[in-house]
Image (tube, rainbow, N blue to C red):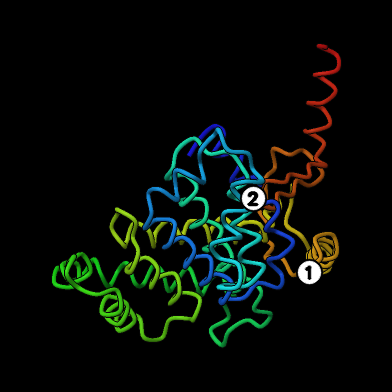
Amino acid sequence: MAGVSSESLTKALTELEPKLPFASLQLAKELFGILAAVDSSAGLRRALTDPSRNGEEKSGLIKQLFGGKVSAEAVDIAAGLASSRWASARDIGDALETLAATVVIAVAENKSAVSASGITGLEELENDLFSFNQAVASSHEVQRALSEPQASAAAKITLAERLVPAASEEAKVLIGQAVAQPRGIKATKLVSRFAELAAKRQRRWIATVNVTRPLTETQASRLQQGLNSLYGRELKVNVNVDPTLIGGIRVQVGDEVVDASVLARLNDLQRQLAG
């Protein structure tokens, strides 16, 4: 997805973000349900991506079709997508799939407690998705069963859940979606896409800290507390010793970099002098 469609998806994800702390699996299932309806009708996809129609007209079509059938929140999200511009008829479906999967991933992320095995909800989700793909890869019989066009979606979901019986509810939703509605690709490839989305969100809360020398326990504790306070949640902090920094500290959380190293200040000075 590129160009105008990519911009529309980015906008939709930004608008979705404030809703994610309160997200539910039911919302995700409703969005996947809307996706199924959109995918089943070429006429509807054309209407929702027709550049000659204004955004209000297209969002109104979503509200007319799905209002009262799913939650108002799901309708609003889908209507927001419809009001944007899309380069191709498929792109709006891809975007809806991404938003629905993001909701599922956020539900896993919002699990406050770390599991008995010591991993977070996001890590558990990633592990479950990986385990499913491993199980499928190890059996040609399972691969044939999941790709059998005559098999019902329900039968494929039942088979998939047998492969990973201990999977989290979030993983079951994503795996079930992938085997029931792979949208023209292999189910395992779609599961891998979902895993990539989860990994990307996981990286938002991993702080990579580069320092010039190892931290003491006190310094490490202060760093952890300071970063937790700054980002408003418990971060996983990975500390690397990098003597090339000369002095100071460099912190990266997701795509955000906070660089307070001496080297960074020297580079800034060099740029100013050259400038």
Residue nearest the viewer, comparing 19 with 247:
19
Residue occupying the point 61% across, 60% down = 63
| Residue 177 percent location from the top left of the image | 40, 68
Q: Is residue 29 above or below residue 252?
A: below
Residue nearest the viewer, comparing 207 with 193:
193
Residue receiving disc 2: 12
Residue occupying the point 52% across, 55% down = 96
Hey, which quadrant is residue 244 in on the image? top right
| Quadrant, the C terminus | top right
Of badges 2 and 1, the one in the foreground is 2
Q: Which amino acid does label 2 sit on?
A: Ala
Q: Is residue 139 above or below residue 38?
A: below
Query: In 3D space, how far apart are the residues under numbered discs 2 and 1 (Cα atoms)?
Result: 42 Å
Residue nearest the viewer, comparing 74 with 247:
74
| Residue 129 percent location from the top left of the image | 41, 69
Hey, which quadrant is residue 24 in on the image? bottom right
Q: In this view, does 165 lie to the left or right of 253?
A: left
